[in-house]
Image: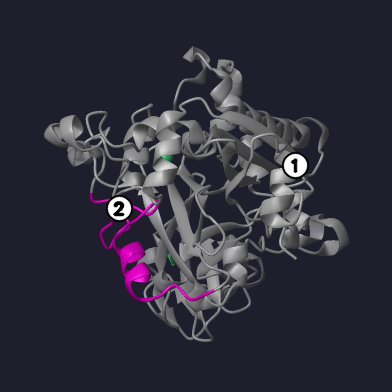
Amino acid sequence: MLSIEDNELLTRTGADTPMGQYFRRFWQPVALVEELPEPDGAPLRVNIMGEQLVAFRDTEGRIGLLDGRCPHRGAEMFFGRNEECGLRCVYHGWKFDVTGKAMDLPNIPPGARHHDTVAIKSYPTREQGDMVWAYLGPSAEFLPDGKLPEPPQLEFTQVEAGHRYVTKQYVDCNWAQIMEGDLDTSHFSFLHMPAPSVASNENPDAPADARRLRWIRNDPMPHFSILEHDLGFVIGGMRAGDAGENYWRITQFTLPSHGTGPSTFPGETYFGFTMVPITDQSCWMYCYGWNPERAIEGEERAKLEQGHGIIATTGADYVPVRNRTNDYMIDREAQRNVSYTGVKGLAEQDLMIQESQGRIVDRSREVLTATDAAVVRFRRTLLEGAKALAVSGKEPAAPWQAEAYRVRPGSWIAAEDTSFEDVMLERFDDPLGRIK
Ligand code: FES
Ligand SMILES: [Fe+2]
């Protein structure tokens, strides 16, 4: 459990909070590239960590991320005209470029000092891995060498476009409890299982075959091992497999809010996600599947587009179709006879239970067990990082190691007496799952 103070610290990411300041040291996704498809197209509202912003792709194809409100009298820039390399407020015509510089202030006399002083807040952006990333941290002049860090080179951003599938889904609660749900792979033995009355170990929702489901079902108390590194940690969840073997599910956590799916065997498609707070009570989950060895196409791509694994079935607005407002379309008959939850879709099962913990789960009232080891480590890592920055001005090292973000998760079967360190070497040829 956490104290009420630490729970607040972990979950609040507004600009004036320690975690908000910590998060702002890292590049974060603010949109999918498909949301800003063309030069001079419609602007996009971007709400992130309590800030209301607007993104637009200018005539030259550059992406600007500006304050959502016009500095003149606060009109919403979203309604603006995206024209000739700038976004123009339609109230009185003030126009700004992607860097926030005023290009035209038509109701101010020539020569007035406003022409030199007026600007709109803006943040740098980059396109990488079909996502638009933004840096909401200190401006370059306050950073070492006067340079910004670069967005993390998570592996899906580095493979060819055809080898990945990238989307996002709206989540109706605080970001941290979703992260915790991913790191706690022990819940798979319950939440994602067939109903107890179902003899077969098959679950159409779960990206695992009957053999894996049998191991997961039979062992509800996986043993967790954790290896820490500069960017976060890697967790091995070990369950008994067939005679003389263990079944390992390995998950990567990288700062501040990137997680992975642990189910992938070599050759299969990998899954990961990035949690981005919208407010303290809602967030985006950017989800991605990638396959370093082959393109994701045909039936496999169609499946992901319709919602599969950690990817929910969403509408055009990226809001899950089965959501809090309709009780995730829970089917009590199916809960008796088909699946443990009666809810369709692994992602929806996760969303149902994690959103149900409360808009911000009260961690001062929980009773933790040994299978919550990764959850505890996650909280400690984030709290230590945010406190070190807030109290002693210690900047996190991770944002400056963009290349080191190329780490893989995955599954492995190892002889019973194999240590986690050796499992990592067997599975990835590297103690931390880094790829060369
Ligand atoms: S409020 Fe935007 S130009 Fe007046
Ligand atoms: Fe889950």
Residue depicted at 44% across the width and 31% down the height: 187
Front residue of this view, candidates 289 and 75: 289
In this rendering, is residue 248 above or below 34?
A: above
Front residue of this view, candidates 309 and 39: 309
- Amino acid type at circle 1 is Glu
According to the image, label 2 marks what residue?
319
| SS for callout 1 | helix
| SS for callout 2 | loop
Q: Is residue 231 left or right of residue 221?
A: right
**Percent position of residue 84, x then y:** 48, 86
Is residue 318 found inside the magenta-colored segment of the image?
yes
**Percent position of residue 336, x then y:** 17, 29
Q: Is residue 65 left or right of residue 323?
A: right
- Given the current orientation, which residue lies at the most extreme left position? 333
The quadrant where ligand 1 appears is bottom left
**Percent position of residue 130, x then y:** 50, 71
According to the image, label 1 marks what residue?
421
Q: Are marks 1 and 2 in contact (CB under 8 Å)?
A: no
**Percent position of residue 429, x then y:** 74, 57
Please give the label number shown on residue 280.
Answer: none
Q: Quadrant of the C terminus?
A: bottom right
- Amino acid type at circle 2 is Val
In this rendering, is residue 219 above or below 100?
A: above
Task: Give the magenta-colored segment's residue range.
Answer: 294-321
Q: Is residue 435 left or right of residue 16?
A: right
Residue 15: name its quadrant: top right
Q: Could one spot residue 282 in this view of the protein?
A: no
